[in-house]
Amino acid sequence: MLDVLARTIAVGALLGGSLAPSFAETVGGERIRIVDGDTIAIGDQRMRLLDIDTPEIDSPRCDVEEDLGHLAAERLSRLIADRLVVIDRSGTHDRWGRPLVRLIVGDEDIGDILVREGLAVRWEPGREAWEARARHWCGDDWRAEE
């Protein structure tokens, strides 16, 4: 239990938070089900990775986006496989009620890895940002495939 508390404090400090423990838990990667590149589930509880967006799998705006979405989900799966994963809950939820979380493996934020590898972009709110993400994954003529 003390190890989990120490990891929680370390994750809070790593992410720029205070030294007070945040709501975090450490789980084995085998317990986490990958829904897509930025959504996971443990049991019936779905959680959304905070501050990133990966290409869509369920409702892609083009074939390239769907292919990249599968690559992002596969990479997320490999990053957590057989590892201890700290799930750090931000305390907020998305519009579908999913908790917003950071996944930490070792001392790295999984979202940062996905962004660095080009499999995710930083999430920004609004229609304009949504369209920018569509152009990013599908190019300028993404509306032709709607």
Image (cartoon, rainbow, N blue to C red):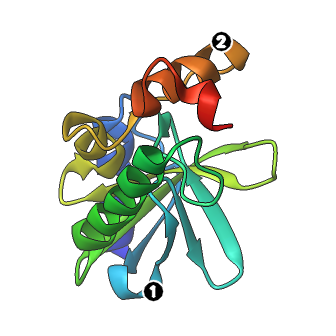
Q: State left or right for residue 34 relative to residue 90.
A: left
- Which tag, 1 or 2, sits closer to the chain's start? 1
Q: Which residue is pictured at 71% across the width and 81% down the height? A: 44
- The x and y percentages for residue 92 are 71, 41
Instruction: Count the numbered circles shown.
Output: 2
Instruction: Give percent across and percent down for residue 13.
Output: 32, 37
Residue hosting label 2: 128
Query: Closest to the observer: 40 or 17?
Result: 40
Left or right: residue 73 versus residue 141 is: left
Q: In the picture shown, does residue 23 fall above or below 130?
A: below
Element at label 2: helix
> Which amino acid, by three-letter code, is at mark 2?
Glu
Residue at x 53% of width, y 51% of height = 101
Q: Residue at x 23, y 44 (%)?
A: 113
Q: Residue at x 37, y 87 (%)?
A: 30
Image quadrant where residue 1 sits: bottom left
Q: Position of residue 69 (x, y in %)?
A: 43, 54
Q: Is residue 79 left or right of residue 67?
A: left
Q: Nearer the viewer, mark 1 or mark 2?
A: 2
Q: Does residue 41 appear anywhere in the picture?
A: yes
Between 75 and 67, the one lying in front of the other is: 67
Q: Rounded to the nearest whole Å, what is the CA distance between mark 1 and mark 2?
A: 36 Å
Amino acid identity at mark 1? Arg
Q: Which residue is mark 1?
A: 31
Q: Residues within 10 Å of mark 1 (few under 14, many from 20)?
A: some
Residue 17 visible in the current orientation: no
In the displayed structure, 109 sits above or below 116; it is below
Between residues 112 and 121, which one lies in front from this camera angle? 121
Quarter in which the C terminus is drawn: top right
